[in-house]
C-alpha cells in the first residue's frame, strides 16, 4: 500500500525508531511526505528529512525532554522492553509503563494532536472458534508484558480524553521478517533450511496470524496518519497453522524433506487459535497488507541464505 500524501504535512515523533518495527515505520511516514523525529538510545544513520534524538526514555526527565524538543503534533510510541525470551516477564515492563505515561502527559501538555500506542494480541481472551475483534473480544491477562500494556491503555484513555488528544492503539499479532531474532519461529525455520539442516517443529496444529514486518511498519504509519481512535488490530487477517507455514517454507526452499513436524513437543497450554479480524485496519485506517505469506517467507529465506553457510541435509 502507498500511504496517501495529500494530507496536511505533520511532524511526527517515533520512539523505538531503531527497533524491529520502528525502523519500518519512519521510512513509511517520510515517504508520505511528513517530517519525522526519531528517538533511539543509540542514534540512527542520517537520512534526508529525518531528525534524530538520542535518548533513554527510562531515564528521569527524558520523556518530557524528548516531547519538548521534538515539537511534534503526532506521537507514535513503539519503545518498550522487547528482548527475545525475556520481555514476557521482564520487570522493566513496569518502568516502561511509567515512562510511557510521562511521555503521554507531556504530549498532552504540549498540545499534541494524536498519540498512537502499541499493544499486543495477548491482551485478548482468544476465542477458539474465531478471530479477535476490537471492542467485542473480551480482554484477559496472560503475562506481565500484556497486562502492563493493557494498564497503559486504560491509563492513557482519561489523559487523552481530558486533553483532547486523539488516542489510537495498535495491537500487534505475530510478526516476522528477514532481520528478526534468530530464535523466533520463522527465522528458526528459515535459517535451518538455508543451512541445509532439519527444521524441527512442534505438531504445528495451532492457528496463528503472521504478518510481514514491512506490512506492520506501514500499517502503523497508516494508523498514525488516520483519525481512527481506539484499538486496531495490526495483522494480515489470514489464519494459518504453524504446520502449514513450515511446509510452505520447505516448499519455497526446495527442501520440504527438511521440515520435521512433531520433532519438538507442543508447548503446555498453547492457545489453539490467535487470529485477527482486520476490518478496522482495512476500512477505517485504509490499510491493506501487501506481502502475502509466500512472498514474505521467500524474502526471509533469501536473507538467511545470504548469511548462513550451506550444509548437508
Image (cartoon, rainbow, N blue to C red):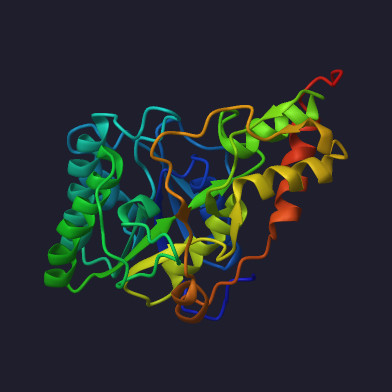
Q: Looking at the picture, how far across and down is residue 13, in whole percent? A: 39, 55
Q: Quadrant of the C terminus?
A: top right
Work out whether 18 lies above or below 285.
above
Work out whether 95 lies above or below 146.
above
Please indicate, yes or no, whether residue 167 appears anywhere in the rendered image: yes
Q: Looking at the picture, how far across and down is residue 116, in whole percent? A: 34, 61
- Relative placement, left or right, of 63 versus 4 is left
Please indicate, yes or no, whether residue 49 appears anywhere in the rendered image: no
User: Camera-side residue: 77 or 236?
Assistant: 236
Q: Please report the residue visible at 17 percent of the width from the left and 42 percent of the height from the top.
A: 98
Q: Quadrant of residue 96?
A: top left
Work out whether 262 lies above or below 235.
above
Q: Please report the residue visible at 53 percent of the width from the left and 29 percent of the height from the top.
A: 265
Q: Looking at the picture, how far across and down is residue 222, in whole percent? A: 50, 68
Q: Quadrant of residue 280?
A: bottom left
User: Camera-side residue: 148 or 271?
Assistant: 271
Q: Please report the residue visible at 70 percent of the width from the left and 60 percent of the height from the top.
A: 292
Q: Please report the residue visible at 84 percent of the width from the left and 18 percent of the height from the top.
A: 311
- Relative placement, left or right, of 202 versus 139 is right
Q: Quadrant of the N terminus?
A: bottom right
Numbered marks: total: 0
Q: Looking at the picture, how far across and down is residue 157, in whole percent? A: 18, 65
Amino acid at each position: 500500500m502507498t500511504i496517501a500524501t495529500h494530507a496536511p504535512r505533520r511532524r511526527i515523533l517515533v520512539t523505538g525508531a531503531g527497533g524491529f518495527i520502528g525502523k519500518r515505520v519512519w521510512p513509511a511516514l517520510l515517504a508520505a511526505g511528513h517530517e519525522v523525529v526519531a528517538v533511539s538510545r543509540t542514534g540512527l544513520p542520517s537520512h534526508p528529512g529525518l531528525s534524530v534524538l538520542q535518548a533513554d526514555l527510562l531515564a528521569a526527565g527524558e520523556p518530557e525532554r524528548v516531547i519538548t524538543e521534538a515539537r511534534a503534533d503526532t506521537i507514535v510510541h513503539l519503545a518498550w522492553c522487547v528482548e527475545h525470551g525475556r520481555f514476557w516477564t521482564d520487570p522493566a515492563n513496569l518502568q516502561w509503563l511509567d515512562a510511557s505515561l510521562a511521555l503521554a502527559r507531556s504530549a498532552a501538555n504540549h498540545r499534541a494532536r494524536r498519540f498512537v500506542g502499541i499493544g499486543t494480541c495477548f491482551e485478548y481472551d482468544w476465542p477458539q472458534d474465531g478471530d479477535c475483534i476490537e471492542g467485542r473480544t473480551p480482554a484477559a491477562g496472560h503475562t506481565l508484558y500484556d497486562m502492563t500494556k493493557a494498564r497503559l491503555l486504560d491509563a492513557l484513555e482519561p489523559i487523552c480524553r481530558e486533553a483532547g488528544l486523539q488516542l489510537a492503539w495498535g495491537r500487534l499479532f505475530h510478526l516476522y521478517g528477514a532481520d528478526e531474532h534468530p530464535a523466533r519461529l520463522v527465522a528458526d525455520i528459515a535459517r535451518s533450511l538455508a543451512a541445509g539442516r532439519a527444521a524441527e517443529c512442534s505438531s504445528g496444529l495451532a492457528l496463528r496470524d503472521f504478518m510481514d514486518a514491512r506490512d506492520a511498519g506501514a500499517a502503523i504509519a497508516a494508523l498514525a496518519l488516520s483519525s481512527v481512535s481506539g484499538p486496531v488490530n495490526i495483522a494480515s487477517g489470514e489464519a494459518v497453522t504453524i504446520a502449514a507455514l513450515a511446509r510452505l517454507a520447505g516448499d519455497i526452499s526446495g527442501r520440504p524433506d527438511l521440515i520435521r513436524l512433531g520433532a519438538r513437543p507442543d508447548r503446555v497450554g498453547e492457545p489453539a487459535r490467535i487470529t485477527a479480524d482486520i476490518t478496522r485496519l482495512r476500512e477505517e485506517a485504509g490499510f491493506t497488507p501487501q506481502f502475502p505469506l509466500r512472498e514474505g517467507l521467500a524474502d526471509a529465506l533469501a536473507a538467511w541464505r545470504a548469511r548462513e553457510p550451506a550444509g548437508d541435509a
